[in-house]
Amino acid sequence: MPLRSLPTLSDIEAAAQVVYRAFPPTPQYRWGLLSERLGTDCWLKHENHTPVGAFKIRGGLTYFDQLAQRGNLPREVISATRGNHGQSIGWAARQHGVPCTIVVPRGNSVEKNAAMRALGVQLIEHGDDFQAAREHALQRAAERGAHMVPSFHTDLLRGVSTYWWEFLRAVPTLDVVYVPIGQGSGACSAIAAKQALGHRARIVGVISAHATTYADSLAAGRVVEAPVSTVLADGMACRVADAAALPVLAQGLDHLVQVSDDEVARAMHHLYTDTHNLAEGAGAAALAAALQERDQLRGLTVGLALSGGNVDAALMAGVLSAAVA
């Protein structure tokens, strides 16, 4: 996908009206303790404050809105997820009266699974990782003649771009922003919003050091599969990069940062102590990356995406009880 194919300012403004029928803009705050920890002004965008606890709902709302506008609402949808995308699609499908099946890998977050079922989703557990779940969902959709909702698509970007549009307009002084990368919709949407607004902020992508397909693929200029071993950052636990996202990221990102599970755990702990917000692993990755680059950020205004707060209670309790340096 070339940059010129990203959502435009008018696309994003129209998408915002769709999103705001479900919930208002999420807040962004300059947290004193977080700024002190980072050694510079730090703003946090609270996508953990959406009705499903993560930014993904924005994309589901606009994806289904576009289907409805085209008169193409399907009789059934299927998708794959580690949790937040599935909640997004489940929410939007219920809103439009469309039955929804979501495939998750075995051992997925217990609480994310419960949240999807509460939205009326038929949940199927298959495979050992997201890619295996995705392949099963594609096969099932073909067999049933159902519509397969992808994890990366222009109509998803329309909605996700609204959170970056909110953030960049609310804090026009941002110099650099950090965004976690799972399948790429969050980072590509940040690039779209920056381009639409003509904002000057540098965009830094963050991946798990234990799931490096995007780093490997960007370096090679093609999709390169990489093993996944992250325990904490399930939202970034992708084995195969999305080919459509690569050219956008290659052109729009300033650079990539890789964060370990240990760094993510510390960032989850810091976000709790400094802001008293819960962050899932991917939701804390932006802070983990900024702390890794702390010495380079002095004097800059930094924006972080707290992209989601859907972490199982037992896992969060373990993170909070661990000693943090």
Image: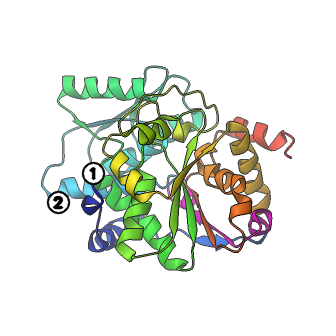
Whether the residues at callouts 1 and 2 have beta carbons within 8 Å, the answer is no
Residue positioned 32% across, 67% down in the render: 15
Residue positioned 58% across, 46% down in the render: 282
Label 2 sits on what residue type? Gln
- Crowd class of label 2 (few under 14; some 14 to 19; many from 20; radius 10 Å): few
Element carrying mark 2: helix
Left or right of 203: which side holds 220?
left
- Give x and y (percent) for residue 79: 34, 36
For the residue pair 186 and 90, the one nearer the viewer reads as 186
Left or right of 178: which side holds 323?
right
For the residue pair 101 and 316, the one nearer the viewer reads as 316
Q: Which residue is mark 1?
A: 1
**Res 121 quadrant in image:** top left
Q: Which residue is mark 2?
A: 69
Residue 53 vertical position relative to residue 264 in the rendered view, above or below: below
Label 1 sits on what residue type? Met
For the residue pair 95 and 249, the one nearer the viewer reads as 249
Residue 263 tag number: none
Residue positioned 35% across, 53% down in the render: 248
**Res 273 quadrant in image:** bottom right
Element carrying mark 1: loop
Q: Which residues are magenta?
A: 33-51
- Give x and y (percent) for residue 94: 33, 48
Residue 316 appears in view: yes
Residue 182 vertical position relative to residue 29 in the rendered view, above or below: above
Residue 23 appears in view: no
Residue 199 vertical position relative to residue 164 in the rendered view, above or below: below
- Give x and y (percent) for residue 230: 61, 32
Q: Is residue 214 magenta?
A: no
- Give x and y (percent) for residue 307: 55, 54
Left or right of 123: which side holds 42?
right
Which comes before the other along the chain, label 1 or label 2? 1
